[in-house]
Amino acid sequence: MTETDINEDTITDAVVQSFSACPDERLRQCLTVLTRHLHAAARELEPTIAEWETLIGFLTATGQACTPTRQEFVLLSDVLGVSALVENINHRSAAEATQATVLGPFHMTESPPRELGDTIDEVGHDEQCLVSGRVLDARGRPLAAATVDVWQADDQGFYDVQRPDAQPAGNGRGLFTTNAGGEFRFRTVVPAPYPIPVDAAVGTLLGATRRHPFRPAHIHFIASAAGHRPVTTHIFVAGGPYLDSDAVFAVKHSLIRPFDLVDDPETATRHGLSNPFRRAEIDLVLEPA
Ligand code: BEZ
Ligand code: FE
């Protein structure tokens, strides 16, 4: 009997075959597809041993940068466009629903529950902004008692968790519940663009490829209501830099909003703002579950 070594031509099928007894069909499919694509990449690139070790070193550094409050693998998925692609794949059918976009790594602490109209700016900046909107179903009907979870960077481009010395925990965050008209509103500062963290493996990748690390200014939202699919999304500040070169490929033009300067003393007084103030609006439209 002649034995044949596994070789370049047969190794892919041999690895795929090794998963044939896997009882979880989806796991078997995932491992099969990944094996085929990884092997195809190795065949196309023909990496040297040194190059392969560099890749392993990079992935090791990515893992070593992860902590309970930092997820470098999510960041890697973000800058490679995989997070945005997976979001797009999972929200294909939602023609009338608000477009979804990436969660990002800064939703790691719970947002403090707040009342409609509260400020999420606990630092007390001078220039305030009123953000308001409604949570609606796909037929445009208001959804009462929906939750709207909000988080954002401040006007310097930092989240509370990045600057615990300068921002109290929960600053720039709020968990709101819509009223009978499906409405939510809060006061805040207009966020600034900011760089994603570049002090670890992902920063090395961006530097080596001469890519900038900035995200355009935005506010994150997760809107949820009983019987509906929650949406994870942002609003982006119109006219700001990086809208066409977001480091994580997450801009949807339907989510860009003007943050206009409004001169309206009566409205300012009603909402506890100094006049003039900035104003942005977004309705969050949910699909049925
Ligand atoms: C964010 O918007 O918070 C974010 C998203 C992806 C990567 C880094 C930050
Ligand atoms: Fe963000």
Image (spheres, rainbow, N blue to C red):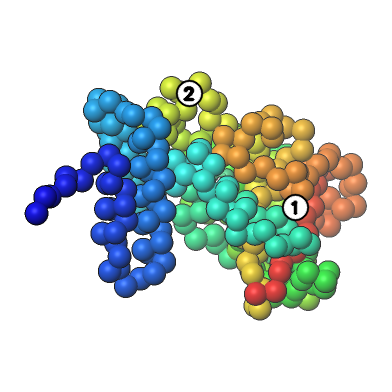
Q: Does the residue labelled 1 lie within 8 Å of ligand 2?
A: no
The image shows residue 184, relative to residue 203, as above or below, that is: below
**Left or right: residue 15 compared with residue 190:** left
Q: Which of 143 and 19 is in front in this view?
A: 19
Question: How much space separates mark 1 and mark 2, taking CA atoms?
Answer: 37 Å
Task: Give the residue number, with chain letter if any, for mark 1.
Answer: 131
Residues packed near mark 1 inside 10 Å, few (<14), some (14 to 19) or many (20 plus): many
Q: Residue 250, located in which quarter of the rendered image? A: top right
Instruction: Name the residue located 26 percent from the left edge and 59 percent from the top edge.
Output: 18
The numbered mark at residue 209 is: 2
Whether label 1 touches label 2, CB < 8 Å: no
Where is residue 73? Give x, y as percent: 40, 45
Q: Is mark 2 within 8 Å of ligand 1?
A: no
Instruction: Name the residue located 71 percent from the left edge and 69 percent from the top edge.
Output: 287
Q: Which amino acid does label 1 sit on?
A: Val
**Left or right: residue 158 compared with residue 289:** left
Where is residue 222? Give x, y as percent: 62, 60
Q: Quadrant of ligand 2?
A: top right
Q: How many marks?
A: 2
Q: Which of 270 and 158 is in front in this view?
A: 158
Local SS, label 1: strand
The numbered mark at residue 81 is: none
Q: From where the camera sits, is residue 128 visible?
A: no
The image shows residue 115, relative to residue 125, as above or below, that is: below
